[in-house]
């Protein structure tokens, strides 16, 4: 992909001024045939006694494009009373009550994204030995619901990796820093404010340079009838955070926002809200967790796409004979590998408040095809907001079905086609491509500096993004 082109997702309403005869549809992820990539090894051979229960895993994945390798930080219970005491074959016959737990964060790496190594790091003692892959525990850093961020823009090399978590002992939100992601500084409590934070606390450094984090809040009584919500906070230094404010809450007890890792593509923020179904014990999905897709223009006002429809579907069946991810799916923010987004997730084969065995799994989707606008057999239209054109042409990311076609026109502020840049002047697009060029009879160089819009006319096709050497006129 030409790095001089800027990418705009059409799911962002602030980038689209008009739509006719089209509808928004989720993209289709593909689960890896290698799933589950790895599982809990408390009862393994040899056993890893610090992997007592993965619970929600809350994976944090970084892809090193230069080395072509992957790094992973995942959350687990290194102590989990009843899970340690109950062998796998006895669990289906026993009620789950949990017992005392202790949090830990583990590190793993992979050369291909499928085969993972859990190295003996020699950093933190567990049961008298440091031969484990633990990098944080409740006793060392707090470490509940830890999110890890690699920050290449921080001039301080000792702060290249940043962690955000809730300390279950002090009940305070805290951060820590690391040069290598393995050896972490003493944790630093937030100077002001805090949050319930018993979730996947995660943060990004967005295009403005600020840190934006998502944590958890509750409405009502958090034990019996409380409803989980996603809360947003921001910081300029990763230490001093603003008072968290609710940015998303569901439709009630059966539709709660458990966690939401976020990421940014172009000017658009995307989120992967985990939807917890708790309210109706008679429902087929009771006590399970689905992962959906959401978008935001500003990371404050969020919109769920295809609300109620999972973006990463759970597997079939129920515990103990169901699929490895039939119970819960907790996604990590994706990493882009070539032209494919890798969506790692913590899967488990049972209900949230039951015995369940957890794992790391992978789903993939072509670049930026998270959701797109679909036109069927009748011509659909999609018009962008005004664009300040630079020098050069643009592309679109689209699927075109049999007999389908996409054409584009460049229009002025009153909606008129520019001469030489109308639908009839456009080279028709009839193929599936991540970056089909937009070509007209005239050279686009003459458009440089003007405020103009793109108007797409298409049938039997889906459009996901458009790119070009232009900026948004109203941003």
Image (tube, rainbow, N blue to C red):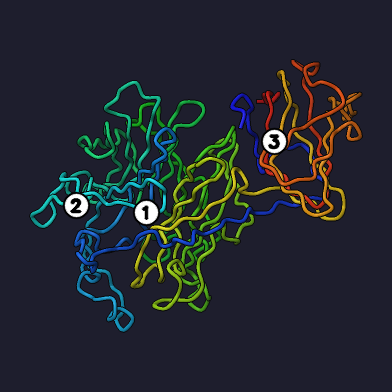
- Residue at mark 3 to residue at mark 2: CA–CA distance: 46 Å
Q: Assess disc 3: are there few (<14), some (14-19) or many (≥20) residues with their C-alpha within 10 Å of its C-alpha.
A: many
**Element carrying mark 2:** loop
**Element carrying mark 1:** loop
Give the residue pinned by disc 1: 115
Q: Nearer the viewer, mark 2 or mark 1?
A: 1
- Residue at mark 2 to residue at mark 1: CA–CA distance: 18 Å
- Residue at mark 3 to residue at mark 1: CA–CA distance: 35 Å
Instruction: Say whether disc 2 or disc 1 marks the residue closer to the N-terminus.
Output: 1
Give the residue pinned by disc 2: 132
Give the residue drawn at x 21%, y 38%. Answer: 183
Q: On screen, 403 above or below 296?
A: below
Q: Report the side of 110 relative to 41 (left or right).
A: right
Give the residue pinned by disc 3: 466
Residue at the limit of the structure toward the left, as seen here? 128
Q: Which mark is residue 448?
A: none
Q: On screen, 275 above or below 264?
A: below
| Image position, residue 229 (x, y; %) | 46, 52
Q: Assess disc 2: are there few (<14), some (14-19) or many (≥20) residues with their C-alpha within 10 Å of its C-alpha.
A: many
**Which quadrant of the structure image shows residue 352?**
bottom left
Instruction: Say whether disc 3 or disc 2 marks the residue closer to the N-terminus.
Output: 2
Between 357 and 297, the residue placed more toward the observer is 357
């Amino acid at each position: 992909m030409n790095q001089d082109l800027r990418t705009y997702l059409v799911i962002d309403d602030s980038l689209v001024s008009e739509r006719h005869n089209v509808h928004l549809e989720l993209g289709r992820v593909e689960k890896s045939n290698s799933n589950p990539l790895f599982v809990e090894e408390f009862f393994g051979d040899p056993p890893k006694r610090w992997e007592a229960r993965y619970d929600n895993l809350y994976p944090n994945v970084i892809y090193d494009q230069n080395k072509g390798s992957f790094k992973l930080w995942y959350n687990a219970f290194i102590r989990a009373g009843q899970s340690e005491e109950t062998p796998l074959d006895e669990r289906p016959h026993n009620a789950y009550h949990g017992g005392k737990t202790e949090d830990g964060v583990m590190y793993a790496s992979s050369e291909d994204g499928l085969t993972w190594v859990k190295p003996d790091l020699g950093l933190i003692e567990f049961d008298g030995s440091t031969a484990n892959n633990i990098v944080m525990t409740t006793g060392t850093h707090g470490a509940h619901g830890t999110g890890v961020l690699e920050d290449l823009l921080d001039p301080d090399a000792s702060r290249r990796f940043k962690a955000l978590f809730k300390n279950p002992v002090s009940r305070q939100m805290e951060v820590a820093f690391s040069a290598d992601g393995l050896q972490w500084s003493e944790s630093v409590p937030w100077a002001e404010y805090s949050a319930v934070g018993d979730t996947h606390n995660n943060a990004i450094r967005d295009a403005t340079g600020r840190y934006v984090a998502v944590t958890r809040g509750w409405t009502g009584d958090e034990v019996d009838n409380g409803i989980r919500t996603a809360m947003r906070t921001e910081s300029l230094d990763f230490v001093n955070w603003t008072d968290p404010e609710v940015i998303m809450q569901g439709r009630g007890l059966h539709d709660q926002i458990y966690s939401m890792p976020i990421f940014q593509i172009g000017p658009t923020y995307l989120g992967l809200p985990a939807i917890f179904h708790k309210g109706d014990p008679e429902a087929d999905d009771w006590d399970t967790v689905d992962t959906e897709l959401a978008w935001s223009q500003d990371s404050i006002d969020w919109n769920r796409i295809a609300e109620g429809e999972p973006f990463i579907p759970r597997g079939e069946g129920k515990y103990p004979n169901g699929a490895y991810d039939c119970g819960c799916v907790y996604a990590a923010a994706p990493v882009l590998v070539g032209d494919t987004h890798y969506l790692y997730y913590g899967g488990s084969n049972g209900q949230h408040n039951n015995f369940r065995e957890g794992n790391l799994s992978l789903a993939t989707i072509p670049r930026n095809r998270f959701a797109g606008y679909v036109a069927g057999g009748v011509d659909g239209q999609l018009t962008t907001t005004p664009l300040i054109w630079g020098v050069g042409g643009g592309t679109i990311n689209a699927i075109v079905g049999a007999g389908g076609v996409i054409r584009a026109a460049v229009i002025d502020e009153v909606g008129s086609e520019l001469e030489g840049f109308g639908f009839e002047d456009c080279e028709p697009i009839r193929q599936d491509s991540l970056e089909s060029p937009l070509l007209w009879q005239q050279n686009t160089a003459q458009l440089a500096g003007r405020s103009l819009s793109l108007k797409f006319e298409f049938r039997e096709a889906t459009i996901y993004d458009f790119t070009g050497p232009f900026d948004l006129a109203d941003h």
